[in-house]
Image (cartoon, helix red, strand yellow):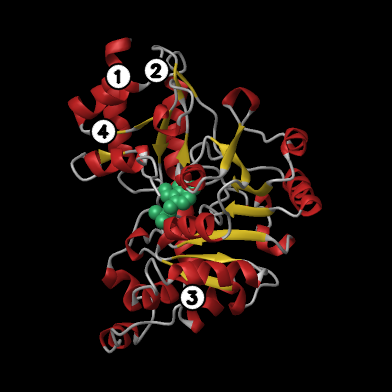
Amino acid sequence: MKVEPFALERFFARHEFSARHVLCASDCETFSLGELLAMDPGAAEAFSALRLGYTETAGNPDLRLEIASLYEGISADDILVFAGAEEAIFVFMNAVLKAGDHLIVQTPCYQSLSAVAAAAGCRVTRWETSVGQGWVLDADWLDGQVTDSTRAVVVNFPHNPSGYLLQADRFERITAIARRSGLFLFSDEVYRFLEYKTENRLPAACEIYENGVSLGVMSKAFGLAGLRLGWVACRNHEVLRAMAELKDYTTICTAAPSEFLSLLALRHRKKILERNLAIIGSNLEYLDAFFETQRRFFTWQRPQAGPVAFPAVTFAGNSDDFCAELMQTYGVLLLPGRLFAAEPRHFRIGFGRRDFRQGLDKISEYMKKYI
Ligand SMILES: Cc1ncc(COP(=O)(O)O)c(C=O)c1O
């Protein structure tokens, strides 16, 4: 299998740890180990006594129970744990799909959602969305694309990079099309729980559809990317069995310390999510004010959920030079839109971290040259 280089991850590998201000991250502010352990009396002692042998391949039973409680009508048996969302994507595409299968993928997207299946010999149809159409997915279009060889539809809400959240009735329509044609609905929900208005939260695909595969992770809403712990929730146990069998060839099981800390964090998720939503909310206000003063130079569509947005420059044909100059002069890292194979004027900005304002102030300084 030869998969094309992951443009966004290669870009991060080059710049993430040398940039002074990482202003395009998609994860929320993290925690130190000490902060996390302090959330539960006795956790530090229990962590220190943790045995470091292999763990259960499906994931620690208590952790799977806690993950299941994030959903309605889902039990621990419906959960399979992975080393990050990325492993789960790789394993689903290779274990459940086969060469020649057709899948339809919402784009722009996190590259692995389309690239892994393409490398496995699947035929991938891009379900294009754009800022001009408000990132809306057209279910009628989807209906027209389904053929006898179509096996899966891949969606991502809240959406990376736009922060777009589909309306529930549209999501139900997509689910109905998948059900009628017997398709898997692979639903990347890694930014779930970061809706600015809770009432806008979509149901998880696994809740409303027996062949829905919901992807979750500790990295984004919970700010714990370093744990490398993700999962899928799915009521179709054939899917879970096939994925578990391939996982035996990737990681076998996840790291015991990560499982321990994920369980701890999920038990305290209310506090963690409240903190992260507060950081996002105050950074977004600051960002709104920035774009208000810079209206001549950018187009800005306020996201509805998550820690990222996808604005565009209007003073150049693409965002490449803008991003490159900002990195060179101020050490501010933004993500050029072309890394999403999307409209080149766009760039991804991330506002889930506490040091966001300092980075944005540098962009304000840089923009003075245009005034
Ligand atoms: C939409 C989406 N899915 C999956 C992932 C992978 O998550 P992780 O790095 O936690 O495995 C990312 C990471 O940026 C993402 O944005």
Residue position for label 2: 318
- Amino acid type, callout 1: Asp
Cα separation, mark 1 vs mark 2, equals 7 Å
Callout 1 touching callout 2 (CB < 8 Å): yes
Find out whether the residues at labels 4 and 3 contact each other: C-beta distance under 8 Å: no
Looking at the image, is 83 positioned above or below residue 343? below
Mark 1 C-beta closer than 8 Å to ligand 1: no
Say whether disc 3 or disc 2 marks the residue closer to the N-terminus. Answer: 3
Q: Which mark is residue 321?
A: 1
* Camera-nearest label, 3 or 1: 1
Q: Position of residue 169 (x, y in %)?
A: 77, 46
Spatial separation of the CA atoms under disc 1 and disc 4: 13 Å
User: In the picture provided, is 68 more to the left or to the right than 250?
Assistant: right
For marks 3 and 1 on the same chain, the one whose residue lies earlier in the sequence: 3
**Element under label 3?**
helix
Circle 2 sits in a helix, a strand or a loop, which is it?
A: loop
The residue that label 3 is drawn on is 267
Camera-nearest residue between 282 and 122: 122
Q: Nearer the viewer, mark 4 or mark 2?
A: 2
The residue labelled by disc 4 is: 332
- The amino acid pointed to by label 4 is Val
Q: Is mark 4 within 8 Å of ligand 1?
A: no
